[in-house]
C-alpha cells in the first residue's frame, strides 16, 4: 500500500444515538481532503437497537456485550460490502462505555473480523492509545474538522458543533498549518445532546425522536431546571473533557413533572445552553457555528443554539459539507492517518500528554 499520495478510504460510524451505521468515502493523503465519494446508511432494526441499548454502560465480559458486538459487526459488514473499490476501511465500532479516568473506553466490534469478511485492511480501536496516554479518548473528529476548515477556505476561526447523542465542539484556527500545532484546535464534549431527548420520546410516546422539533415547539423551557443542570460538576471542568452517553442520568427525573411538550423544550434548551457555556472556553470568538449531527435537523434546537450563543448557527451543508456523513468521513480520514503514522489526537483535543496516533490495522489473511 502507498506510503504517500491520495488513498480512497471508507469510514463507518455508529453513534451514541443508536440510529444506525453511516458509511462514507473520502479521498485524502491524510493531510488534505482531495475528494468525496459515495455514502450509505443502514438503520438498526428495532430488535438490534434493543440489544445495543441493553448493553450500554457495560464492559468486556459483561452480559450482553457479545450480542451487541455481533449486531455491530453484522450491520457494518452488510453496509461496507458495497464499497469494494476502497483501499482502506476506518471502523469506529459502537461505544458502550466511556470512563477515561477509570476503566477506560469500550467500543464493540472486531476489526479483524471485518477485514476477513471484506477482504480489505481495516483500521479500528481508535481511542485506546489516547486513553492509555492519559487522554480522554474523545472527541476524535477534530483533526478532520481542521481539514474541513481548510477545504471550505475558511480564514477566520470556526466552531464545528456535533449534535449526536452527546454534544461536542471543535474550535479551529484555519490559519495554522497542522492540526497538532499549538493553537490550531480546541475540542471537547459540551454536554448532553439528542440522547436524553430521544430517550424521553421513546419512554413517553414510543417515538424514536422529536421529529423536526415539533413537540418542543409546543412547550416552554424550564429555565430553573436548565440553570441547575449547568451547575453540575462537568460544566466546571476545564477542557479537554469528554462524556459518556449516560453521564446525565438525573435528567429524566428533573423533567419528570413537566408536560411532554415542556420536557422536550427543556431538554432541547439544555443542549443549546451547554454549547453556549462551552463556547466560553474558546480562545477567540468564532465566525459562526457549523452544525453537524442529527441535531441540525431540529429547527427548534438550531434556533435555541443561535439565540443562546449569539452566533450564526448553520448546518454544515451551507458550506458544502455533508452533516449526515461527516463523522463517517472523519474515520476514513483518521484511518489514512493511522496507516501513515500521523497523529490523530493531541493535548488540545483530548488532553493526551502528547500528539498520538491511535488505531490498530488488521489485514485479511492471504
Image (cartoon, rainbow, N blue to C red):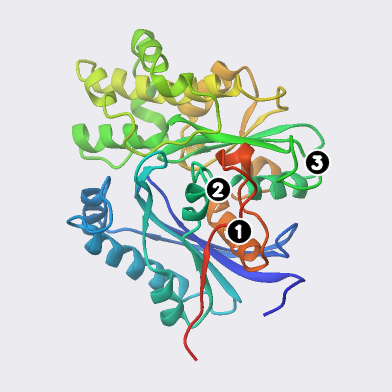
Q: Quadrant of residue 68?
A: bottom left
* Label 2 sits on residue: 140
Do the numbered discs 1 and 2 sit on residues whose CB atoms are within 8 Å? yes
Label 3 SS: loop
Q: Nearer the viewer, residue 198 or 1?
A: 1
| Position of residue 356 measured from the top left corner of the image (x, y, whole percent) | 61, 52
- The CA distance from mark 1 to mark 2 is 9 Å
What residue is rendered at 61% in x and 76% in y?
A: 87
Extreme-top residue of the structure: 224
- The CA distance from mark 1 to mark 3 is 19 Å
Considering only order in the chain, which callout, 3 or 2, is on the residue closer to the N terminus? 2
Q: Residues within 10 Å of mark 2 (few under 14, many from 20)?
A: many
Q: Quadrant of residue 207?
A: top left
Residue 156 falls left or right of residue 332: right
* Label 3 sits on residue: 176
- The CA distance from mark 2 to mark 3 is 19 Å
What residue is rendered at 52% in x and 48% in y?
A: 133
Residue 175 falls left or right of residue 186: right
Reply above or below: 45 against 252: below
* Label 1 sits on residue: 334
Reply above or below: 131 against 9: above
| Position of residue 303 measured from the top left corner of the image (x, y, whole percent) | 53, 23
| Position of residue 130 measured from the top left corner of the image (x, y, whole percent) | 52, 50
Label 2 SS: loop
Amino acid at each position: 500500500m502507498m506510503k504517500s499520495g491520495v488513498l480512497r478510504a471508507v469510514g463507518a460510524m455508529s453513534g451514541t444515538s443508536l440510529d444506525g451505521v453511516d458509511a462514507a468515502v473520502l479521498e485524502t493523503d491524510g493531510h488534505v481532503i482531495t475528494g468525496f465519494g459515495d455514502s450509505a446508511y443502514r438503520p438498526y432494526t428495532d430488535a438490534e437497537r434493543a440489544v445495543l441499548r441493553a448493553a450500554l454502560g457495560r464492559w468486556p465480559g459483561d452480559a450482553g456485550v457479545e450480542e451487541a458486538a455481533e449486531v455491530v459487526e453484522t450491520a457494518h459488514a452488510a453496509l461496507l460490502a458495497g464499497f469494494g473499490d476502497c483501499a482502506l476501511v476506518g471502523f469506529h465500532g459502537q461505544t458502550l462505555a466511556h470512563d477515561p479516568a477509570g476503566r477506560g473506553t469500550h467500543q464493540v466490534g472486531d476489526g479483524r473480523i471485518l477485514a476477513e469478511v471484506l477482504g480489505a485492511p481495516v483500521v479500528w480501536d481508535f481511542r485506546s492509545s489516547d486513553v492509555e496516554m492519559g487522554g480522554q479518548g474523545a472527541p476524535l473528529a477534530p483533526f478532520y474538522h481542521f481539514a474541513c476548515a481548510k477545504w471550505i477556505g475558511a480564514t477566520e476561526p470556526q466552531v464545528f458543533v456535533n449534535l449526536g447523542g452527546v454534544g461536542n465542539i471543535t474550535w479551529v484556527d484555519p490559519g495554522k498549518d497542522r492540526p497538532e500545532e499549538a493553537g490550531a484546535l480546541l475540542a471537547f464534549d459540551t454536554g448532553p445532546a439528542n440522547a436524553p431527548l430521544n430517550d424521553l420520546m421513546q419512554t413517553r410516546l414510543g417515538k424514536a425522536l422529536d421529529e423536526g422539533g415539533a413537540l418542543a415547539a409546543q412547550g416552554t423551557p424550564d429555565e430553573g431546571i436548565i440553570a441547575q443542570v449547568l451547575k453540575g460538576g462537568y460544566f466546571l471542568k476545564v477542557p479537554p473533557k469528554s462524556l459518556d452517553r449516560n453521564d446525565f442520568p438525573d435528567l429524566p427525573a428533573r423533567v419528570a413533572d413537566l408536560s411532554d411538550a415542556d420536557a422536550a423544550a427543556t431538554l432541547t434548551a439544555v443542549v443549546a445552553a451547554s454549547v453556549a457555556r462551552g463556547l466560553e472556553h474558546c480562545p477567540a470568538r468564532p465566525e459562526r457555528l457549523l452544525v453537524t449531527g442529527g441535531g441540525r435537523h431540529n429547527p427548534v434546537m438550531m434556533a435555541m443554539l443561535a439565540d443562546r450563543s449569539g452566533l450564526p448557527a448553520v448546518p454544515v451543508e451551507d458550506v458544502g459539507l455533508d452533516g449526515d456523513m461527516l463523522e463517517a468521513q472523519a474515520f476514513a480520514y483518521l484511518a489514512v492517518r493511522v496507516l501513515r503514522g500521523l497523529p490523530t489526537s493531541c493535548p488540545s483535543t483530548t488532553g493526551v500528554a502528547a500528539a498520538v496516533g491511535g488505531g490498530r490495522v488488521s489485514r485479511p489473511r492471504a
